[in-house]
């Protein structure tokens, strides 16, 4: 087989310490018609904490990058919109995962949301 080093690599994770992470982002008016692009990546994994950073050992569950269907005129509104869309998908998929792992008597997975927006008052 050629190119065995390419593609997705799935790593085993311990379900006792695993969390479900979602990374959301939106690009404000970056398309030719001034519409916005929104996207998120949903992963399941384990976070290893380091000084001032972290390492995430993870497996991708779902990813999406689409043109925003609504006309959004503010950056904060765009960030809130993509968080809501991402969390809806996150809750649906993590509910299914939790139903499955409850059969094995493992505690429910925690949910972590990451965004790249800092808003200071």
Image (tube, rainbow, N blue to C red):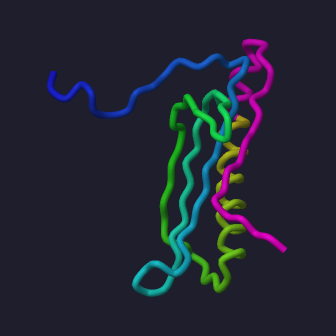
Farthest left residue in view: 2
Q: Is residue 45 above or below residue 39?
A: above
Q: Quadrant of residue 50?
A: top right
Q: Is residue 2 above or below residue 67?
A: above
Residue 13 or 116: which is nearer the viewer? 116
Q: Position of residue 113 (x, y in %)?
A: 71, 48
In the rendered structure, the answer to whether residue 6 lies left or right of residue 50 reads left
Q: Position of residue 86 (x, y in %)?
A: 65, 55
Q: Residue at position x 74%, y 16% from top? A: 103
Residue 25 or 67: which is nearer the viewer? 25
Q: Is 8 included in the stretch rendered in magenta?
A: no
Q: Position of residue 62 (x, y in %)?
A: 53, 44
Q: Quadrant of the C terminus?
A: bottom right
In the rendered structure, the answer to whether residue 90 lies left or right of residue 27 reads right
Q: Quadrant of the N terminus?
A: top left
Q: Residue at position x 63%, y 40% from top? A: 53
| Label total for image | 0
Q: Position of residue 5 (x, y in %)?
A: 27, 27
Residue 92 or 10: which is nearer the viewer? 10
Farthest front residue in view: 51
Q: Is residue 11 above or below residue 117?
A: above
Residue 69 or 37: which is nearer the viewer? 37
Q: Quadrant of residue 3?
A: top left
In the rendered structure, the answer to whether residue 49 lies left or right of residue 108 reads left
Q: Is residue 78 above or below residue 94?
A: below
Q: Residue at position x 71%, y 74% from top? A: 76
Q: Is 114 included in the stretch rendered in magenta?
A: yes
Farthest top residue in view: 104
In the image, which residues are magenta? Answer: 96-121
In the rendered structure, the answer to whether residue 60 lies left or right of residue 72 reads left
Q: Residue at position x 67%, y 35% from top? A: 51
């Amino acid at each position: 087989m050629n190119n065995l080093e390419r593609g997705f690599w799935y790593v085993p994770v311990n379900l006792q310490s695993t969390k479900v992470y979602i990374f959301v982002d939106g690009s404000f008016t970056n398309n030719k018609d001034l519409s916005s692009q929104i996207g998120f990546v949903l992963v399941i994994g384990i976070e290893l904490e380091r000084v001032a950073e972290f390492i995430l050992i993870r497996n991708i569950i779902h990813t999406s990058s689409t043109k925003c269907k609504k006309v959004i005129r503010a950056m904060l509104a765009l960030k809130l919109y993509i968080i809501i869309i991402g969390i809806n998908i996150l809750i649906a998929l993590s509910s299914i995962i939790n139903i499955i792992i409850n059969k094995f008597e493992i505690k429910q997975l925690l949910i972590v949301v990451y965004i790249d927006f800092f808003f200071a008052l």
